[in-house]
Amino acid sequence: MVFAIFILSLGTVAVYLYFSRFFMDLPTGPIPLPPTISVSEGLLPENQVGLKEWAKYGENDYIPVGNGFFLKLEGGTVIAVTTAHSVALHKSNHSLVTIALSIAGQSGYIAEIDALYGEPGKPRYGRDMTVDYVLLCVDVAIDPDLVLSPDPRGEPQAGERVMLYSGLGDGSGGMSVYSGTIMRVDRNGAWAVMDDDFSPAGMSGSPFLSEHTGKVVGMAIVAGSSGGRLMIGMHPIGSLVEKAESASNYPKIQDYQR
């Protein structure tokens, strides 16, 4: 069986066709039954928390490259989270200078960021989605309604209902939210089967929220089609929080070299 694998990035407009055994081990079979969730229920956000990501290289203008979101760590520190495959983090004649986040369809930027929050990850080329991330320092006050809290479990559960808050929005400054169910969770990340078939292109970096807790459980990384169903893979939030809590250096983006 051939799977269509979509790299969910505006900056990487490409579709890869591979046999699953060579590229991604997408979930198959029936959707799991709803799990027992032991943590407290919460409310889902009623505003756009998936944000559009922009990158500025050298003296050039900002260009759209993907999505991201704001995350509140224990102790109150707010950071920004996005993917590694959406930006080029290396020194060149057109080095990345700043990353900005905005609400799609609205003018202006919520934050323009010039420093990393710890060592960044790298673009995902295999099964492991936990390698793909970039954490960013935020040095301006952010509207609390735009800041997400991590789910205390660190990851969703198989059979759990989740909501993808697309950073692309509806094109007019409003929300675009897609529902799905968690198919599988393992050491490489988590996969959700979406209720509807839609184009996921450009949605990487968007947050997945638990319908039960109302908190973020992961960040969209990659998508594929299996058995005629749209699957989206995510980097679990617990892994992102762990990486943030272990951060010890905060280099300027334009000075960073691998």
Image (tube, rainbow, N blue to C red):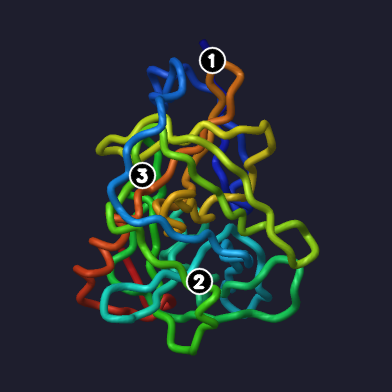
Of circles 1 and 3, which is in front? 3
- Is residue 188 shown to the viewer in this render? yes
| Apparent side of residue 178 relative to residue 85 in the rendered image (left or right) | right
Q: Residues within 10 Å of mark 2 (few under 14, many from 20)?
A: many
Tell me whether circle 2 and circle 1 mark residues in contact (CB < 8 Å).
no
Residue 120 position, x and y percent, is 33, 63
| Apparent side of residue 28 relative to residue 58 in the rendered image (left or right) | left
Of circles 2 and 1, which is in front? 1
Image quadrant where residue 53 sits? bottom right
| Apparent side of residue 33 relative to residue 86 in the rendered image (left or right) | left
Q: Amino acid at mark 3?
A: Pro
Q: Residues within 10 Å of mark 3 (few under 14, many from 20)?
A: many
Q: Earlier in the sequence, mark 2 or mark 1?
A: 1
Q: Residue at x 75, y 78 (%)?
A: 107
Q: Secondary structure at mark 3?
A: loop
Q: Which residue is mark 3?
A: 156
Quadrant occupied by the C terminus: bottom left
Q: Which residue is mark 1?
A: 2
In the rendered image, the vertical position of residue 37 relative to residue 144, given as above or below: above
Residue 139 position, x and y percent, is 43, 88
Question: What is the spatial separation of the Cα atoms under label 3 and label 2, in whole angstroms?
Answer: 33 Å
Q: Amino acid at mark 2?
A: Leu
> Can you tell which mark lies on residue 137?
none
Q: Residue at x 45, y 17 (%)?
A: 30
Residue 47 position, x and y percent, is 63, 67
Q: Amino acid at mark 1?
A: Val
Q: Earlier in the sequence, mark 3 or mark 2?
A: 2
Q: Which residue is mark 2?
A: 96
- Name the residue nearer the viewer: 20 or 213: 213
Q: Secondary structure at mark 2?
A: strand
Image quadrant where residue 169 sits? bottom right
